[in-house]
Each structure stands twice: as structure tokens, then as C-alpha cells.
């Protein structure tokens, strides 16, 4: 068996207390192996962002267990989450989340600088990664000098530069026009063909179709898991 990048079992998550408590995730189990390209698909309010926050160590699970790349999260302090995130996960967000005052190059170099790499090495790797996403001409531009598609490519370079075992994307094409969105998805497929593990959250069936496997979330539960989306949708 391939090594699991995500191994989550019977995870519960609720917000609020007492009578105001909302049970958002009600026992979610997910395994993602190295080299997979998985879409997590579900309607609005089903718990996708909550799940993404747990997978991405932005929030903590209430119960169940979660191993990321073999590391048991329960054994880690919340203080160490930032370090684990930096080493294990490349994030891609709907709204790019680039730092506006920094150039593309510096935005991409940042995860490496946070790891303690030298400025020279980080800069070199960032430049190479920006070249990889076709932005060598735009390295010294700041985000507001770039189009949406270009900004998302910077964000993809930032997610790739640290060579993390997992790429986690939350509605990555949500702020892009159809053509630019398709280009981003095609690039994900290319990265996956090279062996990158990708988990993409989406509410859009057409986008989920681009992944190799779809996990369907409804009302805080995994209600279907399938290699082929058609099997999920044609029931
Ligand atoms: N901090 C919070 N406090 C209370 N309830 C919350 C909180 N965060 C999320 N919820 C509730 O949990 C449910 C799931 O929310 P979540 O954001 O995970 O959904 P989603 O699937 O990402 O939806 P969308 O597609 O609209 O982004 C919703 O009913 C929401 O109101
Ligand atoms: Mg959401």
C-alpha cells in the first residue's frame, strides 16, 4: 500500500456551546494516498471549509484521529501546527492570499525563509518555481500588478516551492474566469501526473470531474466516495 498523506478517522467537529452548539462534522473518515488527486465536493454549508481547516491544521479536531504524512496530530501541540503546515502542506486559496506589499518572488520565497533557508537559496528556488508556472517575466511585480490568473499561478508556485507532500486547494478557480480556471485545473493534472498529491475542495461538479477521485460531503458526513464521479452522480 502507498503511504497515506491524509489518514482521518471518525472526526467530529462542532462550534459553539450548550444549546448553541452546531455539530458540523459528524464522524468523517478520509484516507488520501500519496500521488492521488482528490476532490472534496459538497453543497454550501455541508462542512467543506470546516474539513479543509482541519486537514490544513488551521483548526483542531474535537474527537477521532488525524495523521498527516504519518504524523499523529494528537501528539503535537497547537504551537507546532505552523511548523507542520510549513513542512507538509502547500495551500492554494480562492482569493490567492498573496501578501500585497511583496513581489511575486518574495511571496514565493517566504515559505522557505520561514523554514530558515538562506535568502540566496530561497530566492533561487522561488525564481525557478515561478519559471515553472510561466511567470519568469513577472517575478518582480506585486500582486496588484498581476491578473487574477497570474496571481493564482504565484500562489501555486508558493504552494510548490517547499516540496510539501500535500497540495491543499480551496475553491482554487472560484475567483477566475472559465478559461483561466481551466488552465489552473490542467496544471493541477500535470502536477499530479508528476506525482504531486492534491486535495481540492469545490462545490462545482464540473471542477470535481477533473480530479481522479471524488469524495462527496453532505451535512457533515462523507456520503459517497468514488473513483468515478459518474457513479456518484448517476445513482
Ligand atoms: N465558527 C463557526 N461557528 C458556528 N457555526 C459554524 C462556524 N463555522 C461554520 N459553521 C457552520 O457549519 C456549517 C458548515 O460550514 P462550512 O463553512 O464548513 O460549509 P461549506 O461546505 O464550506 O459551505 P460553502 O460552500 O458555502 O463555503 C454551516 O452550517 C455553518 O453555519
Ligand atoms: Mg466553504
Image (cartoon, rainbow, N blue to C red):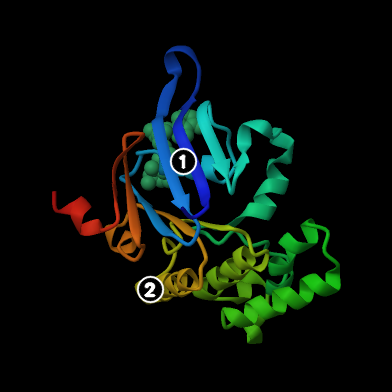
Residue at x 37%, y 77% (from the top left corner): 179
**What number of labels is visible?**
2
Crowd class of label 1 (few under 14; some 14 to 19; many from 20; radius 10 Å): many
| Image location (x, y in percent) of residue 156 | 56, 68
Residue at x 44%, y 19% (from the top left corner): 21
Q: Earlier in the sequence, mark 1 or mark 2?
A: 1
Residue at x 50%, y 16% (from the top left corner): 17
Q: Nearer the viewer, residue 101 or 96?
A: 96
SS class, disc 2: helix
Crowd class of label 2 (few under 14; some 14 to 19; many from 20; radius 10 Å): some
Asked whether mark 2 and ligand 1 are closer than 8 Å, the reply comes as no
Residue highlighted by disc 2: 182
Is residue 25 found left or right of 144 in the rendered image?
Answer: left
| Image location (x, y in percent) of residue 207 | 33, 63
Asked if residue 98 shows in the view, the reply is yes
| Image location (x, y in percent) of residue 101 | 72, 65
User: Cα distance, mark 1 to mark 2?
Assistant: 25 Å
Extreme bottom residue here?
A: 137
Extreme left residue here?
A: 235
Is residue 116 found left or right of 41 in the rendered image?
Answer: right
Q: Nearer the viewer, residue 34 or 112?
A: 34
Quadrant containing ligand 1 reads top left
Is residue 109 found left or right of 12 in the rendered image?
Answer: right
Based on the displayed image, in which of its 4 quarters is residue 126 positioned? Answer: bottom right
Residue at x 74%, y 36% (from the top left corner): 79
Task: Determine which of the numbered discs, if any, sits on residue 51 in the image.
Answer: 1
Q: Contact, CB < 8 Å: mark 1 with mark 2?
A: no
Asked whether mark 1 and ligand 1 are closer than 8 Å, the reply comes as yes
Based on the displayed image, in which of its 4 quarters is residue 222 positioned? Answer: top left
Based on the displayed image, in which of its 4 quarters is residue 109 positioned? Answer: bottom right
Q: Nearer the viewer, residue 82 or 179?
A: 82
Amino acid at each position: 500500500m502507498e503511504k497515506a498523506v491524509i489518514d482521518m478517522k471518525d472526526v467530529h467537529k462542532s462550534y459553539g456551546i450548550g444549546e448553541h452548539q452546531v455539530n458540523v462534522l459528524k464522524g468523517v473518515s478520509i484516507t488520501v494516498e500519496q500521488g492521488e488527486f482528490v476532490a472534496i465536493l459538497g453543497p454550501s454549508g455541508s462542512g467543506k471549509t470546516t474539513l479543509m481547516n482541519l486537514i490544513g491544521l488551521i483548526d483542531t479536531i474535537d474527537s477521532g484521529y488525524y495523521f498527516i504524512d504519518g504524523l499523529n496530530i494528537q501528539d503535537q501541540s497547537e504551537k507546532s501546527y505552523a511548523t507542520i503546515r510549513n513542512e507538509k502542506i502547500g495551500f492554494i486559496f480562492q482569493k490567492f492570499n498573496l501578501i500585497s506589499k511583496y513581489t511575486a518572488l518574495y511571496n514565493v520565497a517566504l515559505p522557505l525563509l520561514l523554514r530558515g533557508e538562506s535568502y540566496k537559496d530561497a530566492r533561487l528556488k522561488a525564481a525557478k518555481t515561478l519559471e515553472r508556472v510561466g511567470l519568469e517575466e513577472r517575478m518582480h511585480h506585486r500582486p496588484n500588478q498581476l491578473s487574477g490568473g497570474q496571481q493564482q499561478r504565484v500562489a501555486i508556485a508558493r504552494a510548490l516551492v517547499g516540496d510539501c507532500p500535500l497540495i491543499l486547494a480551496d475553491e482554487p478557480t472560484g475567483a477566475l474566469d472559465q478559461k483561466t480556471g481551466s488552465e489552473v485545473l490542467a496544471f493541477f493534472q500535470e502536477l499530479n501526473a508528476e506525482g504531486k498529491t492534491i486535495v481540492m475542495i469545490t462545490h462545482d461538479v464540473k471542477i470535481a470531474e477533473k480530479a481522479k477521485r471524488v469524495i462527496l460531503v453532505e451535512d457533515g458526513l462523507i456520503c459517497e466516495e468514488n473513483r468515478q464521479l459518474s457513479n456518484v452522480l448517476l445513482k
